[in-house]
Image (spheres, helix red, strand yellow):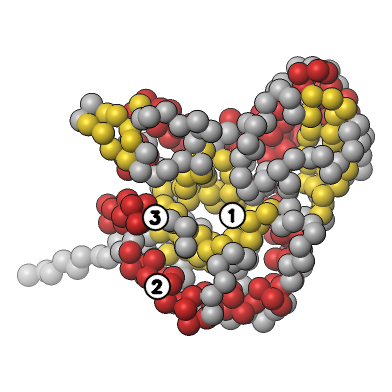
């Protein structure tokens, strides 16, 4: 009699380990989701997004189930069958949602809606920040979905000695019902203030301490040099912001770590959503990533005062520069080129957030490709 051998299922891998892959931390804003929708398969082959569902500044007493469905539908339309990390921002994971079967926590409903859309979600918790209720909700998702978890480690604010750090992270892993082998470590530099020195040699001991917890599925170092407000760029100019997160990651590559993290960033946004929502009172601007800096073409007045037409001039400023990659490079580059030529109506700031993000995603994956091929 022939005996059948039951094959073990392949372990879920949200991103290939190594320095050739890119993690983009994005918010579920229309522009950023549109950038993902238009990303090429070549870009997707080296990209895994970390998407944040951003809550309203003023939370209602309870969300409706339809609200959550709409959030998740937007993400599903943008990501499709690609794996993603999923987190919340400015949103209490336990905030109530009213459904036909009663009231449930919003994060539980998000995971439920993601399963309905067949999304390949890896839940995220923050070491030292996630509440016991948040950890319990994630543990349930880990057990139901079997895709492990991602731990966000705020390396610059969680100052612990190596033994205490190892015990602390292990405690979080235990709370969500998994171990390092089924978890991804997201080492978060957060916003890199230009007035604060951050050196690779100072980060190395803390990174090494976190690596000693176990054989992590993936390790990522991410951060952002994009300020919450663009007042550092004079109005009516094309200024530059150094990409310090890229410089630090490259310096870490030479720090002799036992394992080199993959690269991650917050694309062209500050890690946190703006307090004012980025409404019509904000100054028009377009952000465009190049080798070592982010170019910022900034208007002279608010969108409310000067109108959306000023984006035509900003697009012309960018297309005239030698760094412009050409309209065929990405969907976002095509928007910039067409608007500069009068072939595309200038849209609201969300459109240009999307255009800049579109270019950034392709540029960074190409940058990593060139780096690893050298």
Query: Residue 45: x, y in percent?
Result: 57, 51
Secondary structure under tag 3 reads loop
Q: Quick check: 54 left or right of 168?
A: right
Up the image or down, 126 lies above or below 27; here it is below
Q: Nearer the viewer, residue 179 or 195?
A: 195
Residue beneath the point at 47% across and 58% down: 129
In this figure, which residue is indicated by the disc labeled 3? Answer: 131
- The label shown at residue 23 is 1
Residue beneath the point at 66% across and 73% down: 203
- The label shown at residue 191 is none
Mark 1 in CB contact with mark 2 (< 8 angstroms): no
Query: Residue 221: x, y in percent?
Result: 61, 63
Secondary structure under tag 2 reads helix
Residue 86 seen in the figure: yes
Q: How many marks?
A: 3
Question: For residue 157, which quarter of the picture?
Answer: bottom right
Mark 3 → mark 1, Cα distance in angstroms: 25 Å
In this figure, which residue is indicated by the disc labeled 2? Answer: 170
Query: Residue 260: x, y in percent?
Result: 61, 73
The quarter of the picture where the N terminus appears is: bottom left
The quarter of the picture where the C terminus appears is: bottom right
Q: Earlier in the sequence, mark 1 or mark 2?
A: 1
Residue beneath the point at 71% across and 27% down: 349
Q: Nearer the viewer, mark 3 or mark 2?
A: 3
Query: Residue 82: x, y in percent?
Result: 48, 46
Residue 331 seen in the figure: no
Residue beneath the point at 38% across and 67% down: 173
Up the image or down, 40 lies above or below 215; here it is above
Q: Earlier in the sequence, mark 3 or mark 1?
A: 1
């Amino acid at each position: 009699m022939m005996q059948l051998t039951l094959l073990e299922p392949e372990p879920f891998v949200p991103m290939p380990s190594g320095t050739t892959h890119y993690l983009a931390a994005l918010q579920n804003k229309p522009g950023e989701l549109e950038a993902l929708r238009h990303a090429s398969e070549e870009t997707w082959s080296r990209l895994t997004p970390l998407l944040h569902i951003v809550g309203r500044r003023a939370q209602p007493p309870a969300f409706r189930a339809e609200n959550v469905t709409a959030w998740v539908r937007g993400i599903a339309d943008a990501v499709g069958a690609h794996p993603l990390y999923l987190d919340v921002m400015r949103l209490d994971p336990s905030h109530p949602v009213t459904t036909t079967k009663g009231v449930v926590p919003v994060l539980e409903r998000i995971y439920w809606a993601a399963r309905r859309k067949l999304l390949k979600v890896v839940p995220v918790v923050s070491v030292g920040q996630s509440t016991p209720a948040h950890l319990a909700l994630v543990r349930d998702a880990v057990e139901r979905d079997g895709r492990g978890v991602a731990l966000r480690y705020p390396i610059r604010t969680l100052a612990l000695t190596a033994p205490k750090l190892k015990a602390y992270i292990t405690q979080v892993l235990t709370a969500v019902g998994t171990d390092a082998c089924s978890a991804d470590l997201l080492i978060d530099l957060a916003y890199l203030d230009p007035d604060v020195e951050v050196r690779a040699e100072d980060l190395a001991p803390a990174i090494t301490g976190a690596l000693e917890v176990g054989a992590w599925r993936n390790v990522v170092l991410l951060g952002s040099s994009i300020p919450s407000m663009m007042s550092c760029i004079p109005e009516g100019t094309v200024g530059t912001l150094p990409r310090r997160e890229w410089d630090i990651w490259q310096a870490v590559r030479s720090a002799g770590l036992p394992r080199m993290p993959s690269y991650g960033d917050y694309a062209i946004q500050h890690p946190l959503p703006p307090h004012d929502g980025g409404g019509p009172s904000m100054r028009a601007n377009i952000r465009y990533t190049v080798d070592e800096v982010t170019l910022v073409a900034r208007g002279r007045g608010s969108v409310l005062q000067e109108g959306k037409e000023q984006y035509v001039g900003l697009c012309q400023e960018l297309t005239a520069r030698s760094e412009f990659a050409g309209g065929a490079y990405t969907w976002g580059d095509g928007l910039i080129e067409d608007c500069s030529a009068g072939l595309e109506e200038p849209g609201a700031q969300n459109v240009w957030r999307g255009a800049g993000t579109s270019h950034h995603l392709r540029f960074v994956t190409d940058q990593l490709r060139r780096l690893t091929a050298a």
